[in-house]
Amino acid sequence: MEKLDRIKELAKELKLEYLDASVDKIIEEASINDSSYQDVLLSILESEIYLKDKKAQERRLKFAGFPVIKKIEDFDFNFQKSITKKQINRLLEMDWIDRMYNLILLGPPGLGKTHISISLGYRAIEMGYKVSFVTMDSLMHTLKTQEISRKSKGKMNRILSSSLVIIDELGYLPITREEANLFFQLISSLHEQASIIITSNKGLEDWTELLGDPALTTAVLDRITHRCELFNMSGKSYRLEHRESLF
């Protein structure tokens, strides 16, 4: 028993959580199955790696700040034909993040732009990438308050340290000239440092009106579209077509 207690103490000190929690079970199963020392050690190490990877993924998922979890398996490609399953499967390989390509999803509300962006972000997290999700409105608040708010400063640090930044709902709410300048500074900071997904209900030709300055808009688009895949989505709103009623 003293040796067992010592094993647990050392496992805790070395932060071997699986061994610390399961040493009794490991010894019992090894005895029943007459396992070799190598089999026991291999099983312990594989379980420790699995547990560490799982916890790291959970931290990345919390870090991302998704409003809900969306998976590509739940996306209705039969309803939305502006983007194909073949295209999505290609994006799910995630090599575009390593190459720092950006994605722009344009179209009216209800076409699945946010669903696709979150699904890609979720898969990126599963593959070990650090992801940040933020709506344009929330991003503007964060950018304007980062100098006076520790929470906003921390959120900006997370965004700037991400491999993939998802900016949702650009163009849904008007922005000021100050906000447009802050947005440009962020895009410049992320350029060739991270991949960006932007969803917007405004066509690129309308971004000048949105940002309020032709030169600024050109500079923003120049950086975003340098390496970029653009998806113009069209069709009916999935939410309106599948709305639920009380009666």
Image (tube, grey):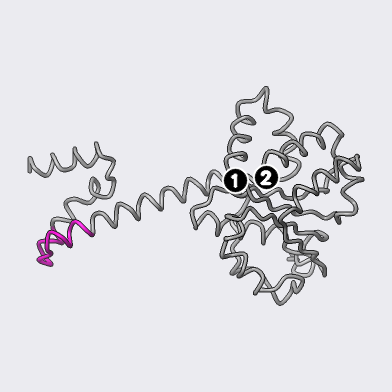
Task: Say how many tags the image has.
Answer: 2
Going by the picture, which residue comes out furthest to the top? 148
Q: Position of residue 230 (x, y in %)?
A: 76, 61
Amino acid residing under circle 2: Val
Q: Is residue 33 magenta?
A: yes
Sooner in the amino-acid sequence: mark 1 or mark 2: 1
Residue 81, label in figure: none
Give the side of residue 165 with respect to residue 79, left or right: left
Residue 65, label in figure: 1
Q: Position of residue 64 (x, y in %)?
A: 58, 46
Res 136 quadrant in image:
top right
Q: Residues within 10 Å of mark 2 (few under 14, many from 20)?
A: many
Q: Find numbered disc 1 in the image and state the secondary structure of the residue it sits on.
A: loop
Amino acid residing under circle 1: Gly
Q: Position of residue 121 (x, y in %)?
A: 60, 55
Residue 134, label in figure: 2
Res 141 quadrant in image:
top right
Give the side of residue 4 with respect to residue 160, left or right: left
Q: Is residue 172 magenta?
A: no
How far apart marks 1 and 2 lie (CA) works out to 7 Å
Residue appearing at x 11%, y 63% in the figure: 36
Res 72 quadrant in image:
bottom right
Q: Main secondary structure of the magenta part?
A: helix
Give yes or no for contact between labels 1 and 2 (Cβ–Cβ under 8 Å): yes
Residue appearing at x 77%, y 39% in the figure: 184
The residue segment tinted magenta is 28-42
Residue appearing at x 82%, y 67% in the figure: 234
Residue appearing at x 81%, y 34% in the figure: 181
